[in-house]
Amino acid sequence: MTVLTLAEVSKSYRGTQVLRPISFELHPGELVALTGPSGSGKSTLLMIAGGWETPDTGTVTPGAPLPAVPMARMPWQHLGFVPQSIGLFEELTVADNLAFAARTVDTGADLAKLLETLDLAKFADRLPTEISRGEQQRAAVGRALATAPALVLADEPTSHQDRTHAEVVLARLRTAADAGAAVLVASHDPLLAAHTDRTIALTGAGAEH
Ligand code: ADP
Ligand code: ADP
């Protein structure tokens, strides 16, 4: 079974090739690392995978665990996204950010437990402006996982974490994969390797993938 298939996807910005044609599949239950130096196209590839950017060539095709609609129209409950920019709902508490994301689904997901697992229990009733950047980022991870989505895309999800909390985040993403999600994590955090099934390495413009 395949959750997402990328075939010969490439992208240029103003004549500069950011992504040379790349193909891969994501399967249920696997956590895949997307690595590469800064500027090698990790974010661009995640945005294409999620349907927020259009590739110049190639296709992005959702598989059986996802509804048969183009990624650009994929409902959020099937697609958990941790943006590099975090982007919480500023007017909602941490708990309500998760509850809002999960409002259309009844996964039986225990959001209080999810917050606890992310070491956020004591911040549940705080607004994003009342917690640290690292705590905000963990809340964004919680929001992405609140619907138990079939596909999770995470862009540098440990960039604002100390080592302990980076492990917390990666372990929770691993748990999501173990529960059946396909999880793609763009990161150069060395801690990630211990949690991944395989790695897709981008090497930057002009080089081989
Ligand atoms: P990474 O996530 O690996 O750091 P990015 O995907 O963010 O890499 O960026 C790859 C390259 O594409 C960079 O050189 C970046 O400046 C460029 N780039 C990304 N998005 C845009 C855009 N919207 N317009 C122009 N250039 C972009
Ligand atoms: P839409 O933009 O399709 O109306 P919503 O109102 O549900 O979607 O959500 C608005 C924004 O909230 C989305 O564009 C996205 O930035 C964020 N969001 C919602 N649900 C999630 C989720 N499960 N994971 C990550 N971000 C989410």
Image (spheres, grey):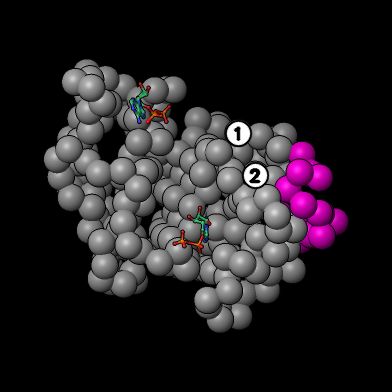
| Residue 20 spot, x, y in % from top left | 20, 30
Identify whether 27 is placed above or below 206. Answer: below
Farthest residue to the right: give it. Answer: 122
| Residue drawn at 30 percent across, 58 percent down | 71
Instruction: Using the numbered discs, state the Cα–Cα distance from disc 2 to disc 1 in whole angstroms.
Output: 8 Å
Front one among 42 and 76: 76
Q: What residue type is disc 2 on? A: Gln
Position above or below: 60 against 100 = above
Q: Where's the C terminus, which quadrant?
A: top left
Does residue 106 show up? Answer: yes
Residue at disc 1, secondary structure? loop
Q: Position of residue 91 (x, y in %)?
A: 70, 55
User: Which residue is labeled 1 in the image?
Assistant: 159
Element on which disc 2 rests: helix
- The question of residue 77 being in magenta is answered with no
Count residues near mark 1 (Cα–Cα under 10 Å), then give few for <14, some for 14-19, many for 20+.
some
> Of the residues shown, which amino acid type is indicated by label 1?
Ser
Q: Give the magenta range.
A: 115-132
Residue underneath mark 2? 137
Question: Does mark 1 have its CB less than 8 Å from ligand 1?
Answer: no
Using residue 180 as the reference point, say whether residue 167 is left or right of it: right
Identified at 39% across, 23% down, the residue is: 39
> Could you tell me if residue 196 is visible in this image?
no
Q: In the displayed structure, does residue 15 sit left or right of residue 41?
A: left
Residue at the image point whose x is 25% and y is 30% from the top: 19
